[in-house]
Amino acid sequence: MSAPQTFKNHARIDPQFHLVIVPLLALNIGYSIYTAVHQGSVDLARHLWWIVMSVVFLLMAERSRAFALKAQDRVICLEERLRLASLLPSSEHSKISQLTPSQLIALRFASNQELPALTLRAVSQELDSKAIKQSVAEWRPDYHRV
C-alpha cells in the first residue's frame, strides 16, 4: 500500500493522460511539422492539414481533462459547503459564502475537528489554497481526484 496522503504527496499524475496521451499527441505534432518541412513540396495542403488536426487533438485532450476537473471542483465546493453548514455554528454560516472556490477545494483536506477554525482563519486572513493546505494538521485524504 502506498504512503498516506499528505500535503507533500497529494498532487497526482494520471499516467494514461500525462505519460501516454499527451506525449504521443505532442510527438504527433512534431512529426507532422517534420513531414511538412521535408515532404511539403509533394502535398503541402495535406501536410498543413495534418498539423492543424494534430494541434486540435492535443487541444481536445487538454479541454476534456479541464472540463472533468471543473465538474469535479464544482462537486467538491458543494460537498464542502454542506459539510461547513453542518460543522459551523449557525452564527458563522455567513462565512461560507465568503470562501472562494479554491479555498473550499483546499479545505476538503481538513478534518472535521479543525475545519471550523481553519475556515474562519481562511476568511479573515484571506488564505490562498496552498496556505490552507499547509495549515491542515490532521490530513483528510482525497484519493478520488481525477
Image (cartoon, rainbow, N blue to C red):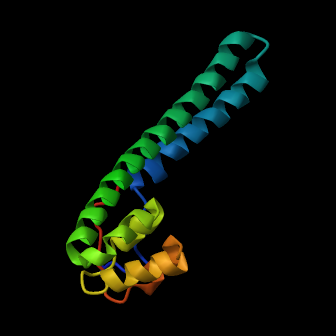
Place of residue 10 in the rendered image (x, y in percent of width and height, measured from the top left): 40, 72
Task: Determine whether 104 is above or below 30 in the image.
Answer: below
Residue at the image point whose x is 65% and y is 28% from the top = 32
In depth, the one of 19 and 11 nearer the eye is 11
Left or right: where does residue 93 sit relative to residue 11? left
Task: Determine whether 23 is above or below 80 in the image.
Answer: above
Quadrant showing the C terminus:
bottom left
Residue at the image point whose x is 42% and y is 76% from the top = 9
Left or right: where does residue 119 sit relative to residue 36? left
Residue at the far front in the pictured view: 91
The answer to whether residue 80 of the structure is visible from this angle is yes
In depth, the one of 118 and 22 nearer the eye is 118
Residue at the image point whose x is 43% and y is 48% from the top = 17
Task: Determine whether 68 is above or below 132 in the image.
Answer: above
Left or right: where does residue 56 sit relative to residue 36? left
Residue at the image point whose x is 33% and y is 76% from the top = 92
Place of residue 101 in the rendered image (x, y in percent of width and height, measured from the top left): 44, 60
Quarter location, residue 118: bottom left
